[in-house]
Amino acid sequence: MAVNNPLRIRQITLDGVTWTPIYAPYDCNGFTIEDQGLATDIKLRSDKDDMTTEVTCVAGTQRKVITNPPFTSAGDSSVVNFKKDELIIYAQSSSGTITAVTTYL
């Protein structure tokens, strides 16, 4: 049965070697990520090859990017920040293989 709900929850496997790209599953304005086990830091980068773009989601916390939709000059509120299949961020476990939980809204 299809769910008519703008919230999506996904589990993604991350390891300590590969920068895993995370894409928007649909047009959305919000994204969160956390370690399902709440025990391992998650490293996030906007550019996987540039360590100066890195921030850390500390174990037991959640990293959020939730924004209001931008408005066009015509006042169109249907514009979104993350378009379907668009790259949001790259993620990597700080140690070993973990399951990250992501939400999109």
Image (cartoon, grey):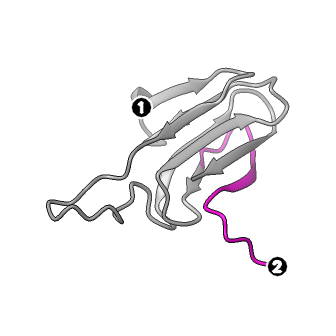
Residue that mark 1 sits on: 53
Other-residue count near label 2 (Cα within 10 Å), few / some / many at <14 / 14–19 / ≥20? few
| Residue depicted at x 75% and y 22% | 60
Q: Would residue 5 be found to the left or right of residue 77 on screen?
A: right
Q: Is residue 58 magenta?
A: no
Q: Is residue 16 magenta?
A: yes
Where's the N terminus, which quadrant?
Answer: bottom right
**Residue 89: where, in percent of width, then height?**
51, 46
What segment carries the magenta color? Answer: 1-20
**Residue 37: where, in percent of width, then height?**
85, 31
Q: Secondary structure at mark 2?
A: loop
| Residue depicted at x 65% and y 48% | 103
**Residue 61: where, in percent of width, then height?**
68, 24
**Residue 5: where, in percent of width, then height?**
66, 64
Residue that mark 2 sits on: 1
Q: Would residue 18 be found to the left or right of residue 96 on screen?
A: left
